[in-house]
């Protein structure tokens, strides 16, 4: 498959996600910021309790927290996208933590920095085209875990970035 074809496929994936009203999930804000967006329980990290609290707020439970904490996607409004983004941050962190165990790898983290981001997607495109070998090993490029590196892995990493799929951990 030539580079032009892969570029068109990648652009098509982004266009389809854009058409569906999705935006690439932003990176979780860093700890140390004054009000950590999405940290509803105030413990300094994003966790499942934050997601449960936000789900309650969206269901009408109310909250004394300001929009700077509740509006996870910084859109200026509180909606289901905030909950989806927060759940994605939590899932990505849990998968990264699990990948820290010896013999484990975070599928999709091709550069080995402990997170799945746009850089990993670009590296995966180069791996798929046969231009390079994945810096963090072949298992990191097998995003969907089926034992092959194929177009489905490009789609899977895009779904992770858009918050539509949770990352997984494999054996290294």
Image (cartoon, grey):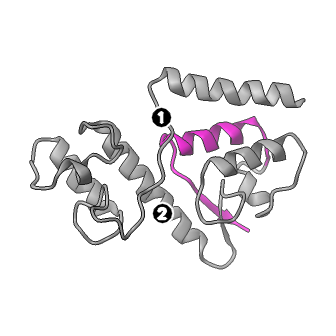
Q: What are the residue bounds of the magenta stretch?
A: 148-172
Q: Mark 1 points at which residue?
A: 23
Residue 136 quadrant: bottom right
The residue lying toward the viewer, choosing from 44 and 35, is 35
The image shows residue 30 at horizontal and vertical percentages of: 42, 64
Residue 10 quadrant: top right
Point out the residue furthest to the bottom here. Answer: 102
> Which is more N-terminal, label 2 or label 1?
1
The residue lying toward the viewer, choosing from 11 and 88, is 11
Does 103 appear above or below 167?
A: below
- Residue 39: tell me if it is visible: yes
Residue beneath the point at 19% across and 42% down:
58
Please state if 63 lies on the left or on the right of 151 as rendered: left
Q: Mark 2 points at which residue?
A: 93
- Residue 143: tell me if it is visible: no
CA–CA distance in space, label 1 to label 2: 19 Å
The image shows residue 26 at horizontal and vertical percentages of: 47, 47
The image shows residue 4 at horizontal and vertical percentages of: 84, 26
């Amino acid at each position: 498959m030539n580079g032009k074809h892969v570029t068109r496929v990648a652009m098509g994936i982004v266009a389809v996600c854009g058409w569906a009203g999705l935006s690439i999930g932003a990176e979780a804000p860093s700890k140390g910021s004054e009000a950590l967006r999405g940290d509803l329980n105030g413990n300094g990290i994003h966790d499942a309790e934050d997601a449960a609290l936000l789900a309650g707020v969206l269901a009408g439970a109310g909250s004394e927290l300001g929009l700077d904490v509740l509006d996870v996607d910084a859109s200026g409004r509180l909606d289901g996208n905030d909950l989806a983004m927060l759940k994605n941050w939590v899932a990505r962190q849990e998968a990264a933590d699990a990948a820290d165990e010896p013999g484990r790898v975070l599928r999709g983290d091709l550069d080995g920095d402990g997170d799945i981001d746009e850089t990993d997607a670009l590296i995966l495109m180069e791996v798929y085209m046969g231009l390079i070998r994945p810096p963090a090993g072949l298992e990191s490029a097998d995003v969907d875990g089926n034992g092959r590196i194929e177009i489905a892995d490009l789609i899977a990493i895009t779904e992770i970035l858009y918050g539509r799929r949770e990352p997984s951990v494999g054996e290294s």
